Amino acid sequence: MIHTGDVFDRSRPPPEAVARAAALFSQVAQRVPLVMLAGNHDRWGLAPHFGGGSARWVLVDQPEQVRVAGLKVGLVPHCRTADQWGALVRPAVRGGVDLLVCHQGFVGARVPGFTFRVGAPRETVSEAQLPPDALGAVMSGHLHPSQTVRWGPHRVVYAGSTERTSVSETHQAKGSVMWTLESRWSWRFVAGRTRPWMPCADLTDLESVDPGDLVSVAPRLLDRLGSAVSERGGIVVLPRRSGRPSRRQMRLF
Ligand SMILES: [Mn+2]
């Protein structure tokens, strides 16, 4: 199992969240080898949270080439610029790999209202960063909508996030990608169970809220509706304070 990054939504997650994640992932690692790559939200690394990892639970905080489950896997954590990424990917995939795992925006990748282009943002990887080595398959985290984009001869597969973190993700399918290696790699998207995200503007909207649902409430309505949402077991989600409009897009991932 490969986690393509942003295990947590912040670099210093609360200890109880770390403990719950550690319990879950150690169960996974007992059944299948588990590889986790640091995303931009995990910028202080994953190893400090999970005690350094093991042969069955590989934590990757730096660019690296590892052997796991009989596969050669190159991994490159998130980089702020495409040039940095281009320099780091080469040693990670030197000699060719079965899989390249990254956490990056590739040119043409989309989130609602925004398409990654060369230089915008600076992290956008394009064909200019293609390494010369053979890459069996390429997968990336970072973007929340599942999608694929072409990258030279390759296709970068984004499984997308497993949960919704924004109202713009209300109608996105969420899940994971199942990879199969026969004579060559194939993959398919597998939808998973996730929390629905519902806007709530009135007490009548609350009738369809089930325990664990994400319910977005406008700040001006919080006094009136917040406790009612909690009583039904819903999780109140408030819009983040917006900065400049151009930054708002970047909060999606
Ligand atoms: Mn990310």
Image (spheres, rainbow, N blue to C red):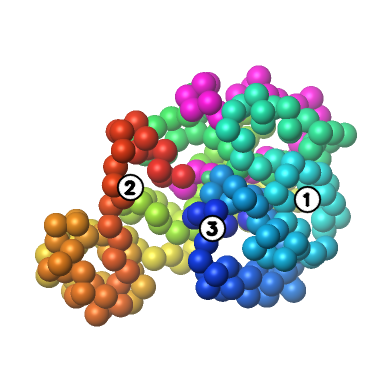
Relative vertical location of residue 206 with respect to residue 65 in this rendering, above or below: below
In the image, residue 16 lies at what x, y percent? 53, 73
Question: Which residue is the extreme one toward the bottom?
Answer: 231
In the image, residue 139 lies at what x, y percent? 64, 43
Q: Is residue 98 visible?
A: no
How many residues crowd mark 1 within 10 Å: few (<14), some (14–19), many (20+)? few
Relative vertical location of residue 38 with respect to residue 12 in this rendering, above or below: above
State the CA–CA distance, disc 2 to disc 3: 25 Å
In the image, residue 245 lies at what x, y percent? 30, 33
Where, by quadrant of the figure, is residue 149 drawn? top right
> Which mark, residue 168?
2
Query: Dot 2: what SS?
Result: helix
Q: Earlier in the sequence, mark 1 or mark 2?
A: 2
Q: Main secondary structure of the magenta part?
A: loop
Choose mark 3 or mark 1, whichever is in front: 3
Query: Dot 1: what SS?
Result: loop
The question of residue 123 being in magenta is answered with yes
How many residues crowd mark 2 within 10 Å: few (<14), some (14–19), many (20+)? some
Q: Earlier in the sequence, mark 3 or mark 1?
A: 3
Residue type, mark 1 in image = Glu
Q: Is residue 109 left or right of residue 19?
A: left
> Which mark, residue 182?
1
Dot 3 corresponds to which residue?
12
In the image, residue 107 lies at what x, y percent? 54, 27
Q: Is residue 232 left or right of residue 14?
A: left
Residue type, mark 2 in image = Ser
The question of residue 145 being in magenta is answered with yes
Relative vertical location of residue 87 with respect to residue 11 in this rendering, above or below: above
State the CA–CA distance, disc 3 to disc 1: 40 Å
How many residues crowd mark 3 within 10 Å: few (<14), some (14–19), many (20+)? some
Q: Is residue 1 left or right of residue 192?
A: right
